[in-house]
Image (cartoon, helix red, strand yellow):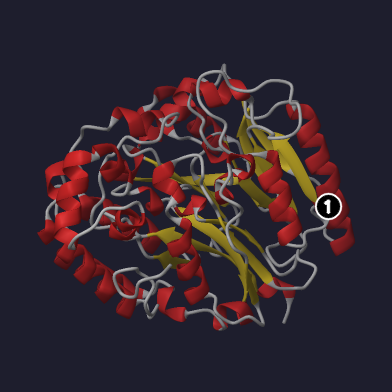
Amino acid sequence: MKKSDAFEVNFDGVIGPTHNYSGLSYGNLASVNSREFHSNPKQAALQGLEKMWYLATHGVKQALLPPQERPHILTFKQIGFQGTDAEILEKVAKTSPDIFRACSSSSSMWAANAATVAPSTDTADGKVHFTPANLVSKFHRAIEHPTTSRILRSIFSNDHYFVHHSALLSHSSLGDEGAANHTRFCTDYGEEGIHLFVYGRSAFRSVSHEPKKFPARQTLESSQAIVRLHQLQQQNVVFAQQNPEAIDAGVFHNDVVSVGNKNVFFYHESAFVSQENVLSELNEKFKRVSEKAGKNVSELIFIPVDSAQVSLEDVIRSYLFNTQLIQPPDQSGMLLIAPKECEEVSSVQKYLEQLLSDPSSPIQSVEYFDLRQSMQNGGGPACLRLRVVLNAEEIAKSNLGVFLNERLYIQMTHWIGKHYRDRMSWEDLSDPRLLNEVQTALDELTQILQLGSIYSFQCIYP
C-alpha cells in the first residue's frame, strides 16, 4: 500500500433529534447566551448534512457519527431515579431540573471532542489508535464517552488495523477534551506527522499563569497520557499551553483560536503562551520529518492573525478559526469552510478578502455555510467533525455504512425529515412521547448505518 493512498476523513457528528440550547458550558459564550432560545432540530441536522454533502461532492472523504440518545435515561437510573421511563422523566424534570438539562444536552454533536486519533503512520505498532475523551470538566459531557466508545468500536472493529483505548481516568487531573486541542501537521496524510497537543493547565506542574475567569479544561497530563497510549514518538510531539487570557475571553478549546492542515497553520496571535517558542519547535520538528521523507516541503507555512486585523472578541463572534481547512483533491489550493458569521463580522470579512487576494496564500478559497443552529449552541464547522487519517486498506476494513455517498445522503435527508421536529422547548424534552420518537429514530439510524446495538435502550450496558 502506497503512503499516498492515505486520506483525511471527516467524521461529522449528526445533530440529534432533541437538539436544544441548554446553556451548560460555562466559558462558551454562545452556549450560555442561547440558553433560553427555542431550537429547530430538523434545520440543525439538515444544515450539518449539507456541509458534509458539499465536501463529499468535492472529493473529500466524508463519514457520519450518529447522535447520542438524549434525554439519557440510563444516567438517571444510575444516580437513583426509579420507575418507568415516563415516570423517571417526570421526576427528574420536576425535582432536579439541572440534572435533567445536563442529561438532555446536545453537545455530542461536536465530534471534535469525541476522541483523539493517531494514524498508523505515526504509531509504533502501525495501527490507528483511538481514545475517547473523558470530558470530565462538564457533567453533561462526561456521560458521552461510553457511547462514543461503542460507536468507534463499531465503525473500526478490525483489531488488526485499529486499537481502541478506554477513556482516561475520570478525574480533573486528566481532563481530556479530545481532538479540539490536537492538530497534526504533515507533508502528505500518509507520511509521518508532527502532533501539537494544547493544554490549559497542569495538574502537577507549576505553569506561569492560568485563567482567572473561565476554567482551563485540558490538562498537560492528559495529553501526555494520550501520547503514551498512542505510541507516538516524543520527537514528533509538541506540547503548548493555551493563552489564559484567550480562555478568559471565551476560547474554551484551542480549535476556537487556531486550525491547521498538512503544512499550513492558521492562528491568532493570542493563541499560546510563549508562542514564538511553540512555532519554532513545531517548525524544527516538521523540517526533520520532511527531510526524512525526502519531500520538497521543508517548512510549515504560518498564517498569523494579529489583534489589529481581527480582535479576539471578533474571532469568538465569528469563529474564524473554528473553520475547516481542507485540501480538496480537485483544487490546488486549500479551502476554508467557514460559518456565515464570518461574512457578517466586518473585520473578519475584510481579513478574508485580503487573504484570498494574496497570490502566495495557501488558502485560495472560502465557502460559507449556514450553521446557525450549531453556532448558537457554541460550535462551528470544526467542532462538528473528527478528523481520522486512514489509508485505502484501513477504509476498506472500516464500516463502510457510515461513509457518505449519494444514496446515504438521500436516506439521511429522508430520515431527518421523517423523525425530527422543527421546534424544541424544555417542556417537549420531558414528554414521554418525544422519548419514544427519539428511540424509534435512533434505532432506525443504526440500521441505516449498519452499526448494530450501540444505544442503552437497545441493550442495557453497564
Q: Quadrant of the C terminus?
A: bottom left
Residue shown at 57% from the left, 16% from the top? 308
Q: Is residue 417 visible?
A: no
Compared across the picture, whether 7 is left or right of 252 comes to right
Give the position of the N terminus as an image quadrant: bottom right
Which residue lies under the disc numbered 1? 234
Where residue 351 sits in the image (x, y, percent)? 51, 28
Residue 298 drawn at (x, y percent): 83, 50
Judging from the image, what secondary structure is the residue with disc 1 in? helix
Q: Nearer the viewer, residue 168 or 281?
A: 168
Residue 252 or residue 406, whichever sits in front: 252
Within 10 Å of disc 1 (Cα), the crowding (few <14, some 14-19, many 20+) is: few
Q: Residue at x 77, y 59 (%)?
A: 232
Q: Is residue 312 above or below residue 415?
A: above
Please indicate whether residue 94 sits to the left or right of residue 295 in the image: left
Task: Place residue 317 in its image quadrant.
Answer: top left
Q: Amino acid type of disc 1?
A: Gln
- For the residue pair 269 and 420, the one nearer the viewer reads as 420
Q: Residue at x 55, y 40 (%)?
A: 255
User: 22 and 52: which one is in front?
Assistant: 22
Residue 23 rendering spot, x and y as whole percentages: 32, 35
Q: At x 48% / y 57%, what residue is drawn? A: 145
Q: Is residue 360 above or below residue 396?
A: above
Q: Position of residue 137 (x, y in %)?
A: 50, 39
Q: Is residue 300 visible?
A: yes
